[in-house]
Amino acid sequence: MPDHTRLPTYFIGHGGVSILFKPGYDPVQNELRQIGREIHGLRPEAIVVVSGHHQSENPGVVEVNLKEPTKVWHDLGPSWKNTYPHVFEYEYPHQSSRALGEQVLQHLQDHGIRAEGVERDLDHGIWVPFKLMFPEGSPEELINVPILQVSSFAGDNYAAHVELGRALARLPGRTLIVGSGMLCHNLRATRESTDLTVVKAIETAALQILETTPQATQGLTEAFLQLPRRPDWPLAHPTVEHVLPLYVTLGAGLEKGEVETWNHDQYIVGQSYLSFRLGRAST
């Protein structure tokens, strides 16, 4: 069996920096830590992440980060400077690898994906959940495992992101593919509304797919490809960058036959923290 089939793949509902310190997020934090312990037990050699905070601006092209070393990028709005200045002191020690980036770049090109190299730091779609999943100084810390970021495509071609996931799943070795985004992401609703109807309905639909659709077939992916046709989808995703990593996860896990979910029913207005694994978490 090829090495790349040994590892499952994950979609992480990453949340914002608030989940690190604001009250009420203990359940979200605890389940992210469960995921981190599980991943640590898989002993990945590298982690390749597609984050909702890196969408290519070049149509038809994905971007592979070649920067080494990378640092934490405090990519937060200006209001955070006044309200919670301490978040700009957050750090997350991690390893980057230009050599890995060049390998992944060539691999994608060899598999028919238009890709180019860029240099950027680690956005909060990665370092925020990873601080909880692999805390500094804990037994689960992954300080010696390189973390590589690959962008999503520009636009909303969900099927193209499934194909990107398929290509990434063919990387050699024990490379873990992670999509980090959110099943629902509408910050305006989070700020201005109290109506949970949309986020609850979308999460219920996604859970039904994950729990009832045979994953060993194309059914799981095909069912998720129908979700954007829902009339409430634009209310869940005024812009789609946060859900695109989910479709990368679907592609990477297409042939893996086990599903596990975390952080269901932990949604707030406009945001779902639903996370899931596709494939068996065994070494």
Image: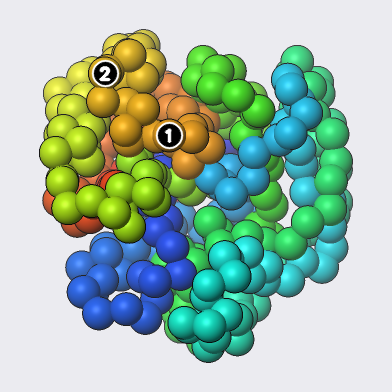
Type of the residue with mark 2 = Pro
Front-lying residue, 180 or 210: 180
Q: Which residue is mark 2?
A: 231
Label 2 vs label 1: CA separation? 12 Å
Number of the label disc, if any, that sits on residue 238: 1
Residue 188, numbered label: none
The number of numbered discs placed on residues in the rendered structure image is 2
Q: Amino acid at mark 1?
A: Pro
Residue located at (17% from left, 53% from top):
194
Of 222 and 57, nearer the camera is 57
Q: Measured from the top left, where is residue 210 in percent x and y? A: 23, 30
Q: Secondary structure at mark 2?
A: loop
* Residue 88 occupies quadrant: bottom right
Q: Is residue 82 placed above or below 263 in the rendered structure?
A: below
Q: Residue furthest front?
A: 192
**Left or right of residue 81, residue 10 in this image:** left
